[in-house]
Amino acid sequence: MKIKCCKENLLAVQDTMDILKGRWKIQIIAALCYNKMRFSDLQKEIDGISAKMLSNELKDLEVNQLVTRTVLNTQPISVEYELTKYGYTLKKIIEQLAEWGISHRKKIISDDRTIV
């Protein structure tokens, strides 16, 4: 029975990774966890992402119902993105990834110093 449960969990993890795969999607979701943002602000927030890549990733997140896109009635027209209610279900995971990343960075830096 445990093997089946493990396989189910592995499948669920694979499904999650298929949606969040790539270098940018988790960063985009993390940036949108606290505020809705305009396209240009998102691009400034996420170092190294091109406009084309950001556009593609946002479209994919929109297809997966994690992000909504709103065209603002401004001159020139601008677009704002925010997490959907469903997208916000990832917030705890993003926060846990950030906490782990901070701890990991500290551990690696600490371990490097003890080796030298």
Image (cartoon, rainbow, N blue to C red):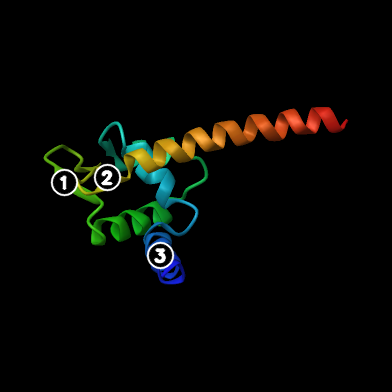
Quarter of the image for residue 18 reads bottom left
Residue at the outermost front position? 1
Q: CA distance from mark 1 to mark 3?
A: 28 Å
Q: Mark yes or no: residue 46 visible.
A: no
Q: Are marks 1 and 2 in contact (CB under 8 Å)?
A: no
Badge 1 or badge 3: first in the primary sequence: 3
Q: Residues within 10 Å of mark 3 (few under 14, many from 20)?
A: few
Relative image position of residue 8 (x, y in whole percent): 38, 68
Q: Are marks 3 and 2 in contact (CB under 8 Å)?
A: no
User: Does 83 sit above or below residue 56?
Assistant: above
Q: Which mark is residue 45?
A: none
Give residue 55's position: percent from left, percent from top.
Answer: 34, 54
Numbered disc 1: secondary structure: strand
Sequence-wise, the earlier of marks 3 and 2 is 3
Q: Is residue 58 above or below residue 46?
A: below
80 or 83: nearer the viewer: 83
At 15% from the left and 37% from the top, the residue drawn is 74
**For mark 1, what is the residue?**
71
Q: Nearer the viewer, mark 1 or mark 2?
A: 2
Q: Marks 1 and 2, Cα distance to the nearest angstrom?
A: 24 Å
Which mark is nearer the camera, 3 or 2?
2
Q: Residues within 10 Å of mark 1 (few under 14, many from 20)?
A: few
**Which quadrant does the N terminus fall into?**
bottom left
Element at label 2: helix
Task: Identify the residue position indicated by label 3 in the image.
Answer: 18
Binning the other alpha carbons within 10 Å of mark 2 as few (below 14), some (14 to 19) or many (20 upward) gives few
Name the residue beneath numbered marker 2: 89
> With 75 as the anchor, is 58 left or right in this view?
right
Which residue is pictured at 26% across the width and 47% down the height? 87
Residue at 36% over, 59% down: 56
> Taking the image as drawn, is residue 89 in sight?
yes
Disc 2 residue type (three-letter): Thr
